[in-house]
Image (cartoon, rainbow, N blue to C red):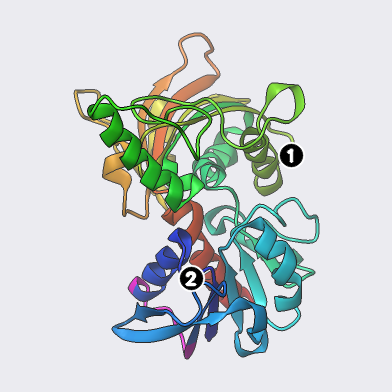
Amino acid sequence: MNIAIVGATGNVGRKILEVLEKKNFPIDNLYFVASSKSAGSKLKFKGKDIEVENLENFDFSKANITFFSAGGKISEQYAPTASQQSIVIDNSSFFRMDPDVPLIVPQVNSSDIKNMKKNIIANPNCSTAQLVIILKPLHDLFKIKRVIISTYQSTSGAGKAPMDELLQQTKLSLDSKKIVSKNFTKQIAFNAIPHIDTFVDEGYTKEELKMVNETKKILDKNIEITATCVRIPVLVSHAESINIEFENEFTIEKIRNALNSAEGCEVIDERKDGGYITPLEAEGKNETFISRIRKDNSNNKAVNLWCVSDNLLRGAALNAVEIAEAYIKNK
């Protein structure tokens, strides 16, 4: 396969490189593509230096598959052109709700790739990706009626500049110096901000509605879901507190077994100090970890659980590469 990565110099682009190398993905030619600012620089792949090419004049016919990881505006402008000559796997939000573009988490709905009409496949929001990988096996067994979710999302979900600002603000705070936030609506160091993306209808944010709409598109439009999304002072990995109400009877043991057997999931749930996974421990790992599984003591048809996943991997780079693998397998 000939592979191109648009946004190769960014957080997710670099992670895609790591995943491709670790998986020993079948590549004949690899093209790094970025803005004119990065064009001419070099990135390493399997010990070899590859020069970054300018997006403005890149020939997409050279690539069988093109990963887009440069934001919605770039995808809007260049992905339709690229898709005329290459299969596009897009990490931005731009095409996710397009009815002609499948929104894919391979462990959940890889068969939807066959519905592709524009040569574009969308990668879901990072917080959605780790959610649906958990919901799928439980929905198959017990039929999910409703999901209530609160997220605790790392700064890497917003890009490299917010990660750098978290480090800068932390130093300023420890030195008792004044902090002026640049990438956040309030101070992020030693704080939590219940606001990700812009406000839209009825007081919700775009991030919250992404989770609602994307989960319905990927899994089941009949599931009721509501979300609150929070940015926390963590560099990598998103955590989620999830309450799931089922239509059918369940047991905690069956839930544990279903999740432990599900591809991409791992249950680490000991009811003792430290018997759970935190964002720090999930960083750099492919699995979505599930902990704190317990019955909702206010609703005998519901369960509470906690999950953590590396958002740059499961929510972006790893999922994108797994989409490519699913496409190759099913084509």
Bounds of the magenta segment = 22-29
Quarter of the figure with the C terminus? bottom right
Q: Secondary structure at mark 2?
A: loop
What label does residue 221 carry, if any?
1
- Magenta region includes residue 141: no
Q: Mark 2 and 1 residues: CB-CB less than 8 Å, in contact?
A: no
Which residue is under mark 2?
Answer: 8
Q: Amino acid at mark 1?
A: Lys
Q: Is residue 225 above or below residue 2?
A: above
What label does residue 144 carry, if any?
none
Residue 115 in the image: state x and y as whole percent.
Answer: 75, 64
Residue nearest the observer in this picture, 176 or 77: 176
Cα separation, mark 2 vs mark 1, equals 34 Å
Residue nearest the observer in this picture, 185 or 303: 185
Q: For this view, does 223 lie left or right of residue 286?
A: right
Q: Secondary structure at mark 1?
A: loop
Q: Please give the name of the residue rendered at 25% of the width and 23% of the height, measured from the top-left corner.
A: 271
